[in-house]
Amino acid sequence: MLRWGRPLPHPFIEQNYFKAVITMPIEREDKAVELIGITKYFPGTVANYKVNLTVKKGEVLALLGENGAGKSTLMKILYGMYLPDEGEIWIDGKKVDIRSPQDALSLGIGMIHQHFTLVPVHTVVENVLLSAFNTPKGKASVSEVAKEIEEIGKKYGLEVDPYAYVNQLTVGMQQRVEILKALYAGARILIMDEPTAVLTPQNTKKLFEFVRDFRKAGNSVVFITHKLNEVMEIADRIVVMRNGMVTGELSRQEASENELARMMVGKELEEITVTNPSEGNLSGEVVLSVRDLKVKSARGHMAVDQLSLDIRAGEIFGIAGVSGNGQEELAEALCGLRSVEGGEVLLEGRNIVGRKVVEIINEGVGYIPADRHREGLVLDMNIEENLILRKFESEKFSAKGVLLQENIHQYAQKAIGEYAIKAPSSKVKVRGLSGGNQQKVVVAREMDIATTVLVAVQPTRGLDLGAIDYVHRTLLRARSEGKAILLISTELSEVLALSDRIGVIYRGRIVKVFNRQDAKVDEIGLAMMGVSNDETQ
Amino acid sequence: MKRSKKIALSLFPVYSVFLGLALSGILMLLLDANPFVVYKKMLIFVFRDAYNVADIFAKATPLILTGLAFGFAFRASLFNIGAQGQFYMGCLASVACSLFMGNLPALVLLPLCVVVSGAAGGLWGSLVGYAKARFNANEFLISMMSTYVAIAIMNYLIRGPLIESKGEYPQTDVITQSAWIPQIIPHTRLHWGFVLAVVVAALAYFILWKTTLGFRIRAVGMNRDSARYAGINEKRIFVEVFFISGAFAGLAGFMEVNGIQHMLVQGFNPYLGAEGIGIAILGNAHPLGIIFAAILFGALKVGGNLVVQTSSIPSSIIGIMEGLVMISVIFSYFLKERILVRMEKKMLQAEERKEGPRK
């Protein structure tokens, strides 16, 4: 068979190879963009895995998914900001090689970034010219460009004073400038990365009007978002991504908010093997009490806004919600890592707001952070060092400023045995461990610190099933030891499986609290999207 | 197989030293000199008498310390480019101490000079750390500029209060004999300061890997977010690291003033700080590596000088050799890193193919 001399095709590309050859002449015509088998590796992770995606001409495609699902990476590949490791890009039925945003622009692909890419001290015209610098249109004179900006603005209802300085414009107007930049460069395919995140409802309405006009003219829009109501309002077709893969594709007629919510957050319910074997202690003493807490995010907006909750000893309180609704800020504030704008955090009745990190550790508050690589571990330190990272100054591990190597070693041996951490020795860098074993190091350390409260944020992110199972069992063990546990996760299935009570966080507030036996996936899912909230308002 | 690959990778810097020397050889060809003859001469001259061999270590002594000055801060991911200025502050403190306390016995005077020069360099350095902690200043620029300020201070003091009693040249009087660091081998320039420098390197190692301070420093250096999460105050670390690092460079001042020059001449040894950076990088910011790298540079200097004095090759060849060795070693680190990343990516790719993605 293979004697014909054709080399064996690449195992991934093979099917796509035929697909490309066979399907192209038949149905390529109405396709503006076709991504085939796109895979992107980043060191230590797979951001996109064999993603196939089609955008038709004259269509608004909503790309729906959680933060970290791979939407932005995929679109950055289409826009030439990243190169794919595998896969092909076809534009208007032709295979193309996009190596930079300039290439993308010349093919008619424009991108509106979530964080604007404007020069604030320059005028609108200057910004538009800057992005078209390498194209023939970049040679036009300022007055010509200004005229054309006004024309485009009139056509699409995006009027902007071309000579205004960008830093004097409102956020909504700045976004118009971003769009004008792309349109001036001749974009027929617009990628919008969470464009409404920064807009007021009125501006959002106007933006949607533009999107409809733009589509009517035969152009295409890819709309990245995680807001369901917007999807239902603007999209013709919806693609859901999760873990770097496309997990669902629906037309708007087929879709319902309930179903989309489930596709985004609840698809893997059956994968959780541990279920809460017994009821937690719902009558224990309140150990951690949060009152009207206000915390600002790094970007300066109020990420946690008047949030209150109580957790009892021997209880797991789960917080469900789409990421970016204040979960991490809440956890950081509880552990002394982020300053608090208002309200109080009572630990066994004592207010711990304003206390230092080390003091809160000594109060027995453990914290498993969401990102073990960025925060939970020092990857280039060894297991022993990471196990004592948050308590190296305790008298067990140091005396007069000198580390007690023997004690540390013995402690590490014990922890490695107890938590079944698989490693050749306790002196190897944690960078070389598998994700599951890395997380076990974090869990072992924080379980030891947490004598009263354990805050766990996304404790199973990126782990395989065996490790997920292990972490879940450990959390349940902590509960039976009488610790108060705050479990924050965007995996609804995880929250459902472990929690005794479930609070739904939306825009920095607990909008609803369910007891576990009354909790329904649909209701929680809608509350996470702020849907029930919007209806009652 | 993976293990042997890793060992081969870790030898890259060693090979690259030879590569740097070979590249210098090509440049010697352009100077109409036969590199084999030059290198042969160099070896013969260096090992012809004990004085030259001893001089290698004498030259290496201050280089170990300025190398440590950069390397120690580098462990906290801080860039101390100002070792030259801290070195000058150490020189000034040490010469002043030797001149004004000259009637103290050597056993008191020498330790006093050690403390004073270290403290002077350390305090000068900690200003940089403070600027970073308090104003979020860029320590790279501030430390670099602090050198120019130190030079101005030195120029003023050497032409003013510290000028020799004749008042002719911008230099100090010769310090009293009891302030001279004793020689290890008589009639050479090798003094006990070399041993002290090695002890200081060992101390740096001890601080970094055996103490809680070192734990904090390395945590801040390897991952600031994790350090914050562990409750470490990174601002305090900035000041502490720059103090210690500056103290190392200040000690180099003591070595040069009390061990070699026995006086302070305006603007001497102007490249010690810059060479320290190269040595620290050559030694991978590890105290042991820094010692070896400093000795290598000392050998290049001594050998180079001898060859230059006895043949028609211009003296710039020494700088060329140092530079090319440095470049090829740095390039080898870069290459090593790239190969490691590529290996990791391949492994990941193979894994995915087998199991499908895990996230």
Image (cartoon, rainbow, N blue to C red):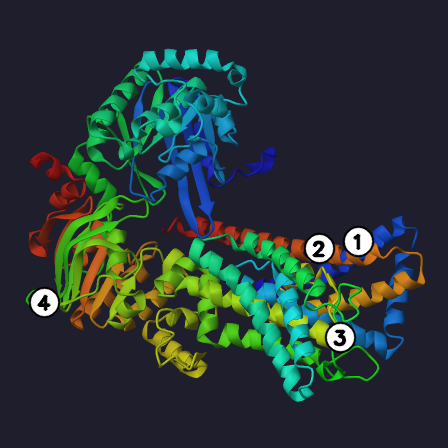
Distance from label 3 to label 2 (Cα)? 36 Å
Image side of residue A211 versus residue A48, left or right: left
User: From what the image shows, is residue B191 above or below residue A267?
Assistant: below
Question: In the rendered image, which residue does mark 1 sit on?
Answer: B23
Q: Earlier in the sequence, mark 1 or mark 3?
A: 1
Say if mark 1 contacts mark 2, CB within 8 Å.
yes
Image side of residue B242 versus residue B61, left or right: left
Residue at 28%, 63% in the rendered image: A367
The local secondary structure at tag 1 comes to: helix
Distance from label 4 to label 3 (Cα)? 78 Å
Q: Chain of mark 2?
A: B
Image side of residue A231 versus residue B247, left or right: left
Q: Where's residue A90, x and y in %?
A: 46, 26
Q: Where's residue B229, x and y in %?
A: 35, 62
Distance from label 1 to label 4 (Cα)? 74 Å
**Hey, which quadrant is residue A199 in on the image?**
top left
Mark 1 vs mark 3: give the one in front: 3
Residue at 60%, 70% in the rendered image: B248
Q: Marks 3 and 2: same chain?
A: yes
Question: In the rendered image, which residue does mark 4 sit on?
Answer: A281
Distance from label 2 to label 4 (Cα)? 65 Å
Q: Marks 4 and 3: same chain?
A: no
